[in-house]
Image (spheres, grey):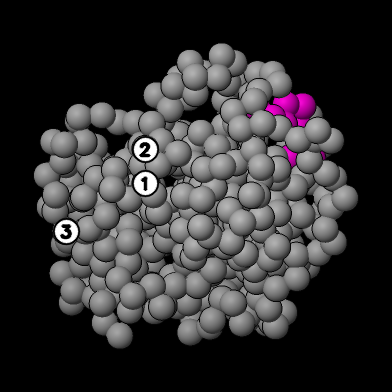
Amino acid sequence: MNSLAKTASRARRARWLALAVAAVLLVAACGSDDDSDAAPATTAAAGDTGTATDTAPPDEGCAPGETDGDLAFYNWADYMDEELLLAFEEESGISVDYSVYESNEQMLTQVESGAAIYDLVVPSDYMVALMISEDLLRPLDFDALPNVVNIDDAWDNPPFDPEHRFHVAYQWGTTGIGMTYDVLDALGGESSWAVIFDPDTAALVPGSISLLDDAPEAVSAALKYLGYSITETIESGDEEAIREAGALLKATNERLLKYDSVTFGDDLVNGEVDVAHGWSGGFAQAFFETDAYETHVYTIPVEGGVRWVDTMAIPHNADNVCSAHAMINFLLDAQNGAALTNYTYYGSPNEAATPYILEEILEDPGIYPPPDVYERLELIPQMGDLGLIVQDMLTEAKS
């Protein structure tokens, strides 16, 4: 039983079987959905999470599976199998009002303003820390989450929620570069951020390039190309390095077709771009749906990249807290957790789900990187005051 459990005493179906498994080349062997509205922004906060909220779980707690009203669920687009939602509705007897967002910041604005009330949200790691510090999340009632025992110990007590009171891991992944094999060959078989940021190397790309429309991700990619550690830069408050990365983004802007966090995978496989910055699962989904594994590849650059984890959390002003717990516990079920990953093509933190996850997912190094590659991936820490500067760098680059 993992430590999270100690604190407390199903997806695309047979069509997946038609997948012709091809190697998604992970070119960092040298040396963190997406429908029309989404893009997981990055990664974990390291360090201080701010003042803990005083908001408490329901006074009388929630029994496992108990509901107290229809569920308002706010999530990234294409990040949930509709069949899972239908199965939950059938099992629970309540309805799910499901809506989507494109960024952590969009979700944060909605929760902060109270313009709409949500019972369950899916913030990325660093955003969990920020929402805790602003008293925007309520502690979870782990007695209502018996399936939490299924979560791998590796996800216990992360730096963005050290006492593990406010979140449960949902999916995890990485951020790198998708490209055609022709581009990879032109690069000598080794992926590098230079294909985006170095003008001479980018000139080797026969078509267009896109970059995520996500300030922490874009700045982090530039930092990695420049040789900086993302973690050290943020935690030391190195504004000069951030501005250097911003200047690089601005210099790169004229070579980009667009900034996009929604259709990057589709754009790559349909030929709109030949190089795209994006998230692992978004590329994997696009490659599968178009049978593009023989012509396209997701890579983690030799300089490294970003890893991230998205989480399930309950806003401070949720109306139906027990229903939110019931959905979390439902998704923590081993087979439901596997169905989620078999839909998203992102990594699952649900250890018990592993036997039910498709082999082509488990064996794909672009989804589950080998140890030597994993070591070169960084979580994006909570940025604090630097966050405004990071956002300014992207805004100025795009102007």
1 or 2: tag closer to the N-terminus: 2
Left or right position of 135 against 42: right
Helix, strand, or loop for circle 2? Answer: helix
- Residue shown at 54% from the left, 47% from the top: 148
Q: Main secondary structure of the magenta part?
A: loop
Residue 189 screen position, x and y as percent: 18, 74
- Residue corresponding to mark 3: 23
Residue 353 is tagged as: 1
Residue 131 is tagged as: none
Is mark 1 in CB contact (under 8 Å) with mark 2?
yes
- Residue corresponding to mark 2: 335
- The disc labelled 1 sits on which kind of residue? Ala
Mark 1 residue crowding within 10 angstroms, few (<14) / some (14–19) / many (20+):
many
- The disc labelled 2 sits on which kind of residue? Gln
Closer-to-camera residue (247/111): 111
- Residue shown at 70% from the left, 51% from the top: 166
Nearest-to-viewer mark from 3 and 1 = 1
Specify whether residue 95 is painted magenta.
no
- Distance (Cα) linking label 3 and label 1: 23 Å
3 or 1: tag closer to the N-terminus: 3
Quarter location, residue 70:
top right
Which residues are the magenta region?
Answer: 315-323
